[in-house]
Image (tube, rainbow, N blue to C red):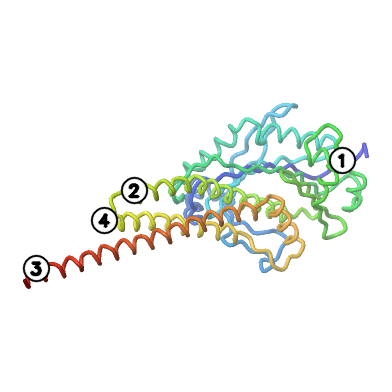
């Protein structure tokens, strides 16, 4: 439909960072309140009863100063917010309202925003804001750890068109493919079908379509619940990727330490084994604690529609696959420190036996 236009909607660009082992949200809220005169809130899904969906620990939302991004049409000022999670992740969100925009222009604008602030763009805006947050909230960050791992996600949100559309009408009459793919060339039928495979509707007049790095949301009631759920799923992916890479770096180091410990003189080996085992135990405990927090970041129980979207998003973003990789590496480390404790115990037993034999020998000499 060439005359179709978006009368109410916006474009949401997310960039997620891991900035610390954990964040003390109560302290962060107090620090930000002093800095920004109270522009904070604890996240709650707008349209979903609390008993249907609950956060493990509700993240802290803060309002940042607007920023200007450069699009092909010129500079545009956009709203910026941040959301802090207790497991150390931060989401920065750019929100660009798009009132009375033709559908083709809306699609082009979304792709322009992606080029301006997406993964392949200049990261200055994001870097400046995250650095500013680190400075202001420094006292609330537990074990700050700058990470090069980031996730980004782009969401096109429409509350109303200039015609009454159902979800089925949109799929039949609106070409979502350029918006979901970012491609200008015509895609094959199989590629188009794959992009539209993850689609959901609860009422007759809503629609959600998910892809790996983008989503389209048609929600006439203006609820932000679906976008919030997608953000949490991306935060979980970010954290699991972080711990996957952390353990990737730790395993070779662990093997080197084990070999170095075994190659040294044997008598004090028990203590060295025990020290190394305690270090590995601490690492496993920390990673396990944080991964459990990540897993429990959002619990969807009674809202079947949100549960379907959340489950599909988690699967689509490969969160279970990365989680399994993290668990396998944790199992390797657990087996290693169990073996180290066994070797430490064996080494201590050998020392005890040698000491007993030495005492017996001394007593025999004294007796003779």
Determine which quarter of the picture holds residue 280: bottom left
* Quadrant housing the C terminus: bottom left
Answer few, some or many: residues within 10 Å of disc 2's Cα (few below 14, many 20 plus, some between 14 and 19): few
Q: Nearer the viewer, mark 2 or mark 3?
A: 3
Q: Nearer the viewer, mark 4 or mark 1?
A: 4
**Residue 64 placement (x, y as % from top left):** 58, 42
335, above or below 231, in the image? below
The residue wearing badge 4 is: 267
- Residue at (39% x, 48% y) in the render: 259
The residue wearing badge 3 is: 365
**Residue 67 placement (x, y as % from top left):** 62, 35
Measure the C-alpha gap from mark 3 to mark 4. Answer: 25 Å
Q: Earlier in the sequence, mark 4 or mark 1?
A: 1
Q: Earlier in the sequence, mark 1 or mark 3?
A: 1
Direction from residue 150 to residue 362 in the image, left or right: left
The residue wearing badge 1 is: 5
- Residue at (83% x, 43% y) in the render: 7
């Amino acid at each position: 439909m060439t005359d179709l236009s978006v009368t109410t909607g916006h474009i949401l660009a997310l960039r997620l960072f891991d900035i610390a082992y954990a964040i003390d949200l109560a302290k962060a809220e107090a620090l930000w309140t002093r800095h920004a005169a109270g522009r904070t809130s604890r996240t709650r899904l707008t349209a979903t009863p609390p008993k249907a969906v609950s956060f493990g620990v509700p993240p802290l939302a803060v309002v940042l100063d607007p920023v200007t991004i450069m699009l092909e049409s010129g500079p545009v000022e956009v709203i910026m917010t941040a959301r802090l999670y207790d497991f150390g992740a931060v989401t920065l969100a750019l929100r660009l309202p798009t009132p009375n925009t033709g559908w083709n222009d809306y699609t082009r604008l979304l792709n322009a925003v992606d080029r301006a602030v997406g993964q392949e763009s200049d990261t200055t805006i994001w870097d400046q804001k995250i650095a500013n947050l680190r400075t202001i909230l420094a006292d609330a960050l537990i074990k700050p750890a700058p990470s090069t791992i980031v996730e980004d996600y782009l969401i096109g949100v429409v509350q109303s068109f200039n015609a009454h559309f159902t979800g089925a009408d949109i799929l039949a009459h609106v070409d979502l493919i350029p918006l979901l793919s970012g491609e200008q060339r015509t895609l094959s039928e199989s590629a188009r079908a794959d992009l539209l495979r993850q689609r959901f509707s609860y009422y007759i007049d809503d629609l959600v379509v998910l892809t790996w790095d983008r989503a389209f949301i048609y929600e006439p009631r203006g609820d932000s619940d679906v976008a919030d759920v997608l953000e949490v799923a991306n935060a979980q992916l970010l954290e699991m990727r972080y711990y996957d890479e952390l353990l990737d770096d730790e395993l070779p180091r662990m093997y080197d330490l084990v070999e170095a410990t075994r190659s040294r003189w044997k008598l004090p080996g028990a203590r060295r084994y025990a020290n190394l085992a305690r270090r590995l135990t601490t690492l496993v405990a920390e990673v396990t604690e944080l991964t459990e927090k990540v897993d429990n970041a959002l619990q969807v129980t009674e809202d079947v529609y949100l549960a379907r979207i959340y489950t599909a998003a988690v699967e689509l973003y490969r969160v279970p696959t990365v989680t399994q990789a993290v668990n396998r590496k944790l199992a390797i480390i657990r087996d290693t420190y169990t073996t180290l404790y066994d070797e430490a115990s064996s080494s201590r037993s050998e020392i005890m036996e040698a000491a007993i034999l030495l005492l017996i020998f001394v007593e025999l000499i004294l007796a003779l």
